[in-house]
Amino acid sequence: MRKLIMGLCLFLTLTLLTACQNGGMQMYESHFMGPFDTQFEFRAYADSQDTFDTYAKLVEDAFTHYHELYDQYNTYEGLNNIKTINDAAGDHAVEVDEAIIDLLEMSIADYHTYSSKVNVALGPVLSLWHDARESADPQVPDADSLERASQYCDIEKVQIDKEAKTVFLTEAGMSLDVGAVAKGYACELVKNQLVEAGCESFLISAGGNVVSYGHRLVEAKPSSLSKVLPACLNQFTVGVQSPGDGAYANIANTVAIVLDGQSVVTSGDYQRYFTAADGTRYHHLIDPETLYPANYMRSVTVITEDSGLADFLSSTLFLMPVDEGQAFVESLEGVEAVWLCNDGTILYSSGLVEGENFHLYVS
């Protein structure tokens, strides 16, 4: 029996976020769906509903704008975006918004600094897997097609002219795919815009991407989780959702993580995939070396200050064996991670301390 699920890498469920009043400030919330094919939750403290509504409109408008900029499948009137760049591959440079230039420059720098596992020029390979997932009768791309596509994935052939604000893919057949980094980067941009607008304490949940800023106000009736995580009383906390199948069947959440102005991004294998006729499941996280989905773990969650970096690193770590990923994270300053392993084991980096900033659920 074929099963097709389209959606997000992973949802992070928010906990300990009930509204409260303190010093005239109250927590408000809004929900919207659309940008990045994601369900968004925005929660913030404000002195009135009108003030919050101004912030909420900023958030929705900004994410809609960045979605259109980073969209590789659709065109928008009067807007040059990732699809515009791809359509001009091998022919001419395209003038684009600075937010595209900055995202690509960051992604290329991270590719050289951290790991070549995440390559924004891998579009020709990723499009074959995307088409398979979208098909009513998905077929696994054949090895020859994947190998041919991989010949057009040289990141060094992405030519950026920052002064002219242009991007040129110098070889016909190339295409960009920024799916591994765009939403996290957009979250960071929106966070900065909210801070500039005067929002002092908020949390944005965009599927598997969560961004926090400021602190919670102490509530009159704290959650029971604060008994094991006292820091929950005045800081935002997120719970990482279980895959819900295999070794994680019937487990709603696996860990709780206290945030202190940090971002959390999770990459997993169980929200965007298709199941082939032989029962094999093929998810969307493709290893550029094998050209096939990686199967080292069920998910990995990265906690660090910058949401763009967290997005890049979560994809990178998912494509690494767990032991290599653990050593990699321990070598990075200000980065923590949680791995949900295939056998049900939950591993976490040394900076996550049970009872202080982290809680492991016992099922």
Image (cartoon, rainbow, N blue to C red):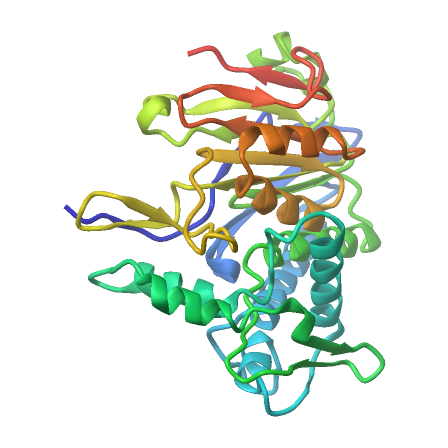
Residue 270 is left or right of residue 15, and the answer is: left
Q: Position of residue 213 (x, y in %)?
A: 75, 39
Q: Which residue is at the far left?
A: 1
Residue 47 appears in which quarter of the rendering? top right
Q: Position of residue 119 (x, y in %)?
A: 60, 59
Number of callouts: 0
Residue 150 showing in the rendered view: yes
Task: Look at the picture and state if 242 lies above or below 99.
Answer: above
Look at the picture and state if 38 lies above or below 45.
below
Q: Position of residue 5 (x, y in %)?
A: 31, 49
- Of residues 9 and 172, the one nearer the viewer is 172
Residue furthest to the top = 227
Q: Residue at x 66, y 16 (%)?
A: 220
> What residue is at 82 percent from the left and 50 percent from the top?
198
Query: In the orientation shown, which residue stands out farthest toward the bottom?
Result: 91
The residue nearer to you, when weighing 298 against 193, is 298
Residue 199: give x, y in percent of width and height: 78, 47
Q: In the image, is 6 to the left or to the right of 156?
A: left
Is any part of residue 44 visible from this angle?
no
Q: Nearer the viewer, residue 82 or 349?
A: 349
The quadrant in which the C terminus is found is top left
Q: Is residue 221 above or below residue 147?
A: above
Residue 33 located left or right of residue 222: left
Judging depth in this view, the residue of 66 and 44 nearest the camera is 66
Which residue is rendered at x = 40% and y = 22% of the image? 343
